């Protein structure tokens, strides 16, 4: 695997995890698209291009893990607010326990070169 | 549309996005444009400096990248021009000379490849079905070839043959113009497909 292949692997990893980051941001209540995108964009190393998050939000909507409501904004055009569905809550819960195991194993390998 | 309240650079960005997204299903493109427009109007004040606007646009990324992420299969590694794509392009162009089967094979490769959008695939299919083989057949009909060959001869003696062009069904000028178009169109399509898959 060349440098290019490794970049692809990292971007695939990022893409795979990102949708659960969206779900996690919605855990404590609804947020509108711009809020979500800016929050993810501000996190270090998570998102390279904010614009590609909008197609992701659309896909999560079509998959039924989030649902949306339009609300008037105090300024400018109406905003689309996202909230978790019960499917989304279940998906997030499943990911959280899997991720904890995955992260611990990878961290142990990366830091000590052995599995704990 | 809120375009008139957008910063000029933001409006230009939205136009680029609209152009890049022409291959998307209309509903998906409309939804995406609405979301990005909301982002732009929120992030860039119409009176902001160009530098501030460009910072926001940089963070958003290339319109083409956003469209690519919206395109089906975007989650898989991007397909690029490989042996299969070259085979499709060549077969679509000249495969018709192999009993038309070659062109059909090219069509199968074209539609099974992920290197092209549905719009590209329709262009590859419809301009011109059969590729250059169709051009050759139509050209022959239009320009009155094949030549007629008449032979006179007496048994036992050498045959004496003369060839003369057959009658043309359209004027030569129209025939040549149509033929030129029929030759250029499949070649242009092949070049287009090669570039789109690059």
Image (tube, rainbow, N blue to C red):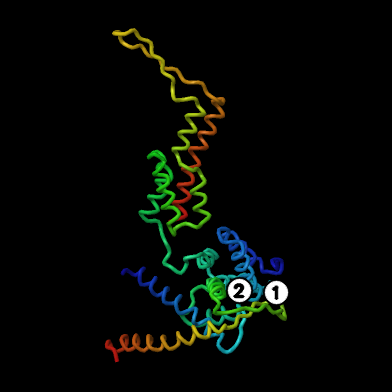
Q: Which of A23 and B129 is in front in this view?
A: B129
Please identify the quadrant where the N terminus of chain A is shown: bottom left
Which residue appears farthest toward the bottom when viewing the image? Answer: A116
Residue A83 shown left or right of residue A110 in the figure: right
Q: How crowded is mark 1: few (under 14 residues within 10 Å), some or many (20 or more)?
A: some
The picture quadrant where one finds residue B54 is bottom right
Residue drawn where x is 40% and y is 38% of the image: B97
Query: Measured from the top left, where is residue A4 in percent x and y?
Result: 36, 68
Camera-nearest label, 2 or 1: 1
Residue drawn where x is 30% and y is 86% of the image: A109
Please identify the quadrant where the C terminus of chain A is shown: bottom left
Q: Residue A26 carries which label?
A: none
Find the distance from the CA under tag 2 to the CA under tag 1. 21 Å
Are callouts 2 and 1 both on one chain? no
Name the residue that disc number 1 marks.
Answer: A77
* Tally of marks: 2
Query: Measured from the top left, where is residue B185 in percent x and y?
Result: 50, 42
Relative vertical location of residue B48 with respect to residue B116 in this rendering, above or below: below
Label 2 close to label 1 by CB (< 8 Å): no
**Chain hosting mark 2:** B
Relative vertical location of residue A53 with respect to residue B99 in this rendering, above or below: below
Q: What element carries label 2?
A: helix
Residue B118 shown left or right of residue A101 in the figure: right
Residue drawn where x is 46% and y is 33% of the image: B137
Relative vertical location of residue A83 with respect to residue B21 in this rendering, above or below: below
Name the residue that disc number 2 marks.
Answer: B52
On the question of residue B59 being in view, the answer is: no
Q: Nearer the viewer, residue B141 or B81?
A: B141
**Chain hosting mark 1:** A
The picture quadrant where one finds residue B44 is bottom right
Q: Which of B159 and B172 is in front in this view?
A: B159
Q: Is mark 1 on a helix, strand or loop?
A: loop
């Amino acid at each position: 695997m060349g440098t290019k292949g490794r970049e692809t692997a990292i971007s695939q990893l990022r893409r795979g995890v990102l949708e659960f980051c969206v779900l996690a941001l919605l855990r404590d209540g609804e947020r509108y698209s711009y809020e979500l995108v800016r929050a993810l964009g501000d996190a270090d190393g998570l998102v390279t291009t904010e614009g590609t998050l909008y197609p992701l939000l659309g896909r999560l909507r079509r998959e039924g893990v989030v649902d949306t409501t339009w609300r008037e904004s105090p300024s400018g055009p109406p905003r689309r607010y996202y909230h978790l569905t019960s499917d989304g809550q279940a998906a997030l819960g499943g990911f959280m326990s899997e991720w904890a195991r995955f992260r611990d194993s990878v961290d142990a390998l990366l830091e000590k070169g052995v599995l704990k | 549309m809120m375009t008139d309240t957008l910063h000029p650079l933001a409006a230009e960005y939205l136009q680029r996005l609209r152009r890049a997204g022409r291959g998307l299903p209309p509903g998906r493109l409309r939804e995406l444009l609405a979301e990005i427009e909301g982002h732009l109007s929120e992030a860039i004040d119409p009176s902001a400096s160009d530098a501030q606007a460009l910072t926001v646009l940089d963070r958003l990324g290339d319109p083409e990248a956003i469209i690519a992420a919206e395109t089906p299969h975007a989650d898989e590694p991007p397909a690029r021009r490989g042996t299969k794509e070259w085979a499709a392009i060549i077969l679509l162009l000249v495969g018709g000379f192999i009993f038309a089967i070659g062109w059909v094979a090219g069509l199968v490769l074209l539609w099974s490849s992920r290197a092209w959008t549905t719009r590209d695939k329709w262009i590859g299919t419809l301009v011109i079905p059969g590729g250059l083989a169709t051009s050759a057949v139509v050209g022959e009909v239009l320009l009155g070839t094949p030549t007629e060959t008449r032979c006179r001869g007496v048994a036992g003696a050498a045959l004496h043959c003369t060839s003369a062009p057959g009658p043309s069904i359209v004027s030569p000028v129209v025939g040549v113009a149509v033929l030129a178009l029929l030759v250029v169109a499949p070649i242009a399509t092949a070049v287009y497909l090669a570039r789109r898959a690059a």
